[in-house]
Image (spheres, rainbow, N blue to C red):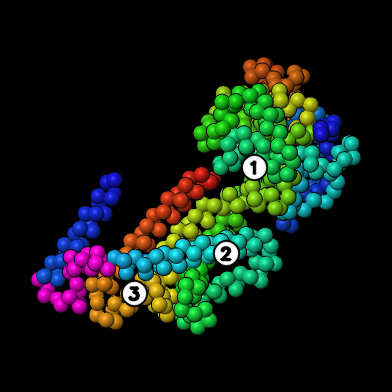
Amino acid sequence: MSTQAPSIHIQGSISIAENRLIETLDMDIKAGTWSCLLGASGVGKSTLLHLIAGLTEHIRFEGSLTTNDRLPLEGRIAYMAQTDLLLPWLSILDNVLIGQRLRGEPIQQNRAETLLEALGLQNHRHQYPSQLSGGQRQRAALARTLMEERDIILLDEPFSALDAGTRAQMQELSAQWLKGKTVLHVTHDPGEAARLGEQIFLLQAHRLQTLDVPALSIPRPVDDPQTLACQGRLLRILREVAG
Amino acid sequence: MKQLLRIMLSVLLILLAWQALVIWGELPHFILPSPLKVVTTLWESRVLIASHAWVTTQEILLGLLIGTVLGALTAVWLSQSSVVRYLVKPVLILTQALPVFALAPLFTLWLGYGMASKILVAVLIIYFPVASSFFDGLMQTPQGWMHMGRVMGATPKRLLWHIQIPAALPSFASGLRLAAVYAPIGAVIGEWVGASQGLGYLMLLANGRAKIDLMFAALFVLALLTLLLHYAVGRFCDVLVEKYRP
């Protein structure tokens, strides 16, 4: 099922309804690494995610979107959003299985239960999303994402609604479980980018900038001086961009 | 329990006022019978009223079932294709522009005096609220779920079945609630236009023969049926909304 996680290369321009969002984009997302994408609101970060995910009905893209293994992106992507997107009428277990149901594949209940157990949700598998805390729900969403066994993971601010402690936990858990996959993570939080980014991009009006990252492997400790320095540097850059 | 007590109290108040009006207003019983007289008639004619009530109940339930199924199927059909929406939606609105009162005699002409014409009137009244509210729900599936489903590689049919329809069930419930109130109206309109059975028929018959106490007794049973249906459907809808609310 799982092939080698590919690198993704995007070159071109992106517009929405005659409105040019990004001009001459040239982005290299390295294979099997965690890339963070920072930028002000409305600059086109989510649009870029949608483009890679193939949700392109409102997007006009002129250019090329390729992988190093020349295989199509379709069917190789899993997606986590800011909200957990759990379906309220399904139990946690059924939510984890929704991908297989939607594709009409055989249901691998054992695998889903193993994943839930590994993420500490075994006692919640028959409960409904409304019975879980925000952190537990986002862990369930992670289990659903892992169940997909995809090479490319797109994250659209998935931890931004969590409290600081739970967020740090989720960052570590995700980094551990998504190791070896090609991750593109849209975030507003310089601290998050400093902890998780093996590549950090800054998207500004019409252009993309690649920033330096600390040498430590991810997830970097929250109190590591290099990581904190990186966080400060990122915040300063974001502060300058905001004008 | 408290609410039930409150309802019973207000019903009792109305009955007392009614009885007082009859006694001190010196109204003849063929204009306004006393509640006591109505209760007596209700008991004495219980077999007659029950047999007519059974006919009306069947018309209401069948009308509700058929109208709801047709409305729901139409909503799903409309939601799946913009071409269908473009062509069929005006027809749907046109069915609302035609007053069912005006069509009822035609149904009696076509389908006869039996149950079918009454069921059809009920179906026509119920169809639109169910179809339009369910359709609205189907068109408003939260975008995040649709995106997730598509990224997961769902076929349109499975996306509809596993996400769009469940997510639209609360909207469907609000249409169904309306339908439960309308269904008895439809059945009785059908009976008024031409019938040989049913509570609506019994009321007209009693009215024509100045048996106002019997008319009131039939009206009382009709109101009771409507309330029961409203309550039962309401509880069912509460469960739907509770479970499927985003």
| Residue at figure coordinates x 55%, y 36% from the top left | A129
**Image quarter for residue B84?**
bottom right
Residue at disc 2, secondary structure: helix
Q: Is B32 placed above or below B131 here?
A: below
Q: Is A37 placed above or below B31 here?
A: above
Q: Do labels 2 and 3 share a chain?
A: yes
Q: Are marks 3 and 1 on the same chain?
A: no
| Residue at figure coordinates x 75%, y 25% from the top left | A179
Q: Distance between the residues labelled 3 and 1?
A: 69 Å
Q: What residue type is labelled 1?
A: Ser
Which circle marks residue B70 in the picture? Answer: 2
Say if mark 3 contacts mark 1, CB within 8 Å. Answer: no
| Residue at figure coordinates x 72%, y 57% from the top left | A17
Q: Is A222 placed above or below A158 here?
A: above
Instruction: Sort mark 3 into few (<14), some (14-19) or many (20+) by Cα contacts within 10 Å.
Output: many
Q: How far apart are marks 1 and 2 (CA)?
A: 46 Å
Which circle marks residue B236 in the picture? Answer: none
- In percent of width and height, residue A201 lies at 75, 34
In the displayed structure, does residue B174 sit left or right of residue A68?
left
**Image quarter for residue B44?**
bottom left
Which circle marks residue A41 in the picture? Answer: 1
Q: State which chain disc 2 sits on.
A: B
B45 or B188, which lies in front?
A: B45
B199 or A144, which lies in front?
A: B199
Q: Which residue is label 3 attached to? A: B202
